[in-house]
Amino acid sequence: MGPDASTSPVHLCQGQLNSRQIKNTGRRIWSRLILRFVPVLGLAVGPVWGDQTGALAGHVIDAESGQPVGWTTVVIKGLERARMSDAEGYFFFANVPLGAHILQSLHVGYHEARFEVEVVAGDTTHVDLAIGHESLHMETIVVEGETESALAPLQEPEVVFSGSKLRQNLSRTIAETIDYEPGIAQRSMGPAPARPVLRGLGGDRLLVVEDGERTGDLSGTSSDHAVAIEPMTTERIEVVRGPRTLLYGSNALAGVVNVVRGYVPSERPDGFGGTVTYQGESVNRGLSGGLTLEQPLGPLALRFDSSLRNADDISTPHGVLANTDIRTGNASVGLSLVRPWGHVGASGSLYDSDYGIPPDPEGGHPDGVSIDLQRQHLEGRGEIVTGPDWLQRLELHHSFSRYQHGEFEASGDLGLEFGVLTHNSGALAHLDRMGPFANGEIGLWFEYRNYAAAGLNFTPPAEEYAGALFTYQEWEYGPWAANAALRVDARRVEPREERDSRRVGSIETRDFAGMSAGLSNHYRASSTLTLGTTLMRTFRAPGIEELFSEGPHLAVYSYEVGNGDLDSERGLGLELFADYHREEGHVHLAVFRNAINGFIFPKNSGAPSLRRADLFLYQTVGERVLMYGAEVTFDWHLVEPWKVAGTLSYVRGRLIDLDDEPLPRLPPLQGHLALTCEPTEALSATIDVRLAAEQDQIGEFEEPTEGYAVLDLSTQYYAQWGGRLHTFSLTLENATDAVYRNHLNRVKEILPEPGRNLRLLHKIFF
C-alpha cells in the first residue's frame, strides 16, 4: 500500500499554497534578475578562453548530394575527443588547442574519412566534412550506403526537432514548438496549457514524456492543465509512431512525443561547456532565458540547466486576451559516474509555473482563474554495457515526482487543488542479434500514483498501481524490413473509501488488464520508393478522474462527473504509407483508420448542473468511435538556393452508436506551405503560410470555425564571434495581423488567436 492520508499530495502542498503571495513576490524579483543576467552572461562567456585555445564548428554533408548527414561521430585524433552531429549534420567543439588537427568521421554506410583543420586561437574555425558512400559487406548481403533512398533505421523517431529546426520553432510550450508537423494540432485554453494533439487524438492517447519517462503531471486529464516541461533548454524533441511506441506505454495509438533533456548525464564531457539562450517576443512582451552547463569531475559528469519565462497577456487583433500571462521557472542538476562498464547517476529538478486561464462571462468565472503548478522530480539511472554475449546493454531507472496544482479564483480563494505522488521504475534489456532478429529489446515497467483533490471537488483520494511487460524486435531481409512489439499491462485503481454515488455510480476498487501489439512492414520497391503498412492494437485503462470525479471545474467551464462503470479502451489502427526519396527531396503519404471501442471522453449533456446552474454538466462516457484520415508531407530542392516544403493533414471521427454523430473537438483540414532560401550555410530565410479549412463537422453543442491563411516569415543566421558560435532566429508570426481561430482552443469564442508577433532567439555555444 502507498502512503497514508497524512502524506497525501494535497496535504503535503497545503503550506506552499497558503504562502502563494510571498512566493510570487520572490519569483518576480528572481525573474527580473535572471532575465537581465542571461544576456550579460552570453556576452561574458566569449572571452573566457585563453590565448591557446579556439573553437571548431562543422557540418557533415553527403559528398554526392550535398545533403546533411546527421548522427555522425566526429573525433579529434590525438585529443580523443568526440562529438555526435545533430539531425542536420552540425557539430561543435569548444576549448580546442590551437594548431593543426585531424578530424575523423564515422558513420555506417559511409567511408571512414579524415580531414585536416587548423584551429586559430580565440576564434572559431568552420569546416565542411564531405563524406562518401561505402558498400557494407556482411556475409552474402550487400547494403549500399545511400542516405537519401535507403530505409531509415526502424528504431529512429519519425520526426526529430533539433539544431536549427528546434531553434526556429522554439515557442512557449512543447505543443507550439512542434505544431507545424503533419497530423499535429494543439489543444489550448490560452498559451500556457497548450498540449499536442496527433491525428485527432490527445490527452493520455498521445503520451508526452521526458527522457522517455512519464512527467507525473495532469496535463492529459484536462484542457487547463499544462505540460510540466519547459522547451527552452530542451536538447531535442522526438515524435515516435508505430510499434516502438509500446516501449513507452500501451495507449499511444496516436504516438509518443519524447522531450530529450538528458537530466542524468550518460557521457563524460571533454571539458567545461554549455549554452546560453535568450528569447523575446512582442505579442505578450515575453522574455525567457536558459542556461545549460556541463563539467567533467574526474570520472564524474556534472550537468546543470535552468530557465525562466516571463510573459504578459496575449494580444490579438481584437484586443488583449485577459489573464493569459505566464511565469515559469525550471532548474535541474545531474551527476553521473561514467566508467568503461557503463554509467550510473542521479538528478533532481524543479518546475514552477503560474499561469492564467481567460475569463468566460457565461462559463462560471467572469474574471478568470489563476493556476499555480509545481513539480519536484528525482531520478536515478544506470546503464551496464558489459555482460553475456546475448546482451548489448541493460538500462535501469527509478523516478519520483511530487506534483501540486492549485486553481485560484479572482478573489484569491482556492477553488480546486490537486496533488499527485508518482513512482516509476523500469528495466530495459537491449539484446544482441538472435537468429533473424536485430535490435531486440525486452523490458519491465512499474508505476505507483497517489492522487488527492481538495477544494470544491468531491473526487475521492485514490491510489493507482500499474505494471507492464513488453518486448520489441526488428527483422530485415533483402528489400523487406519489419518491426513488431508486444506489451501486457495491468492496472488497479483503489479509492481510499468505497461508497455509492448517485451521479458517479459505485466508487470501488477497479482492476484492468489488456494486451497491446504492433506490427509494421516496409518494402523497398525501388531505389526511390518504399511502401509500408502498420497495424496497431492498443489498450487504455480509465484514470482516477474519469472513473470517480465529481464537482465544478471552473477553469474549463464545466461541472464534471465521472463514471464508475467505465471499461477499458481497446483500439485497432491501420496505416498505409509510401515514401518517395530522391536527391532533390522526399514525399511521404499516409492514410489511416482507427477503430476504438469504449472511447472515453467527457460528453456535454447540454443541461446545467443542479449544483452550479452556470456550468454545464459533462458526464464521462465510453463510446465506439471510428476515425480516419490522411497526411502528406514533402520537401523539395528547386534550384539553388531555393527549396519548398509543406504538409497537409485530414482527420474525421464518428460516434458509431450515436447515429454517426461527429466526434467533438477534431482539427479541420490543415497544413502549411513554406519556401526557403539558403544563399549560404550560415544564412536562411523562409516564407511560410499556415492554412486551415472551415471546420463544420462538429459535435453536439460545438461551434464551427472558419478557415484561414496565416503568413509567417523567419530567418536564421549563425556566426563565430569572440571564439564562440552564435545562432540567431528571427520570426515574424502572423505577419498580416490576420484574425483567425483555432478550433481546438476552448476560448476561441472569446477572442481570436494571437496577432502579429516578432520573436528573436539568440543562442551561444561555449
Image (cartoon, rainbow, N blue to C red):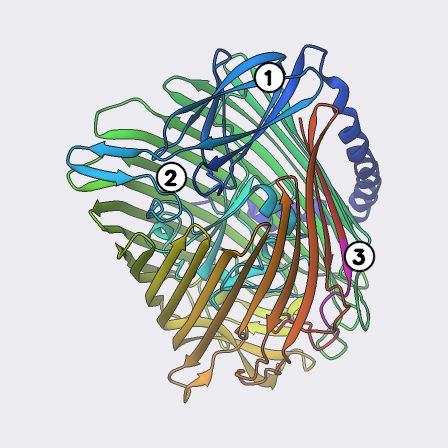
Q: Which mark is residue 426?
A: 2
Within 10 Å of the Cα at label 2, are there few (<14), some (14-19), or many (20+) other Cα atoms? some
* Place of residue 277 in the rendered image (x, y in percent of width and height, measured from the top left): 70, 38
- How far apart are labels 1 and 3 at the CA level? 46 Å
* Place of residue 137 in the rendered image (x, y in percent of width and height, measured from the top left): 22, 32
In front: mark 3 or mark 2? 3
Residue 584 relative to residue 610: left or right: left
Would you place residue 547 above or below residue 763 in this image? below
Tag 3: amino acid: Asn
Q: Nearer the viewer, residue 355 or 304?
A: 304
Q: What residue sits right under mark 1 in the picture?
A: 118
Region rendered in magenta: 751-758
The majority secondary structure of the magenta stretch comes to loop
Q: What residue sits right under mark 3 in the picture?
A: 284
Membership of 479 in magenta stretch: no
- How far apart are labels 3 and 2 at the CA level? 41 Å
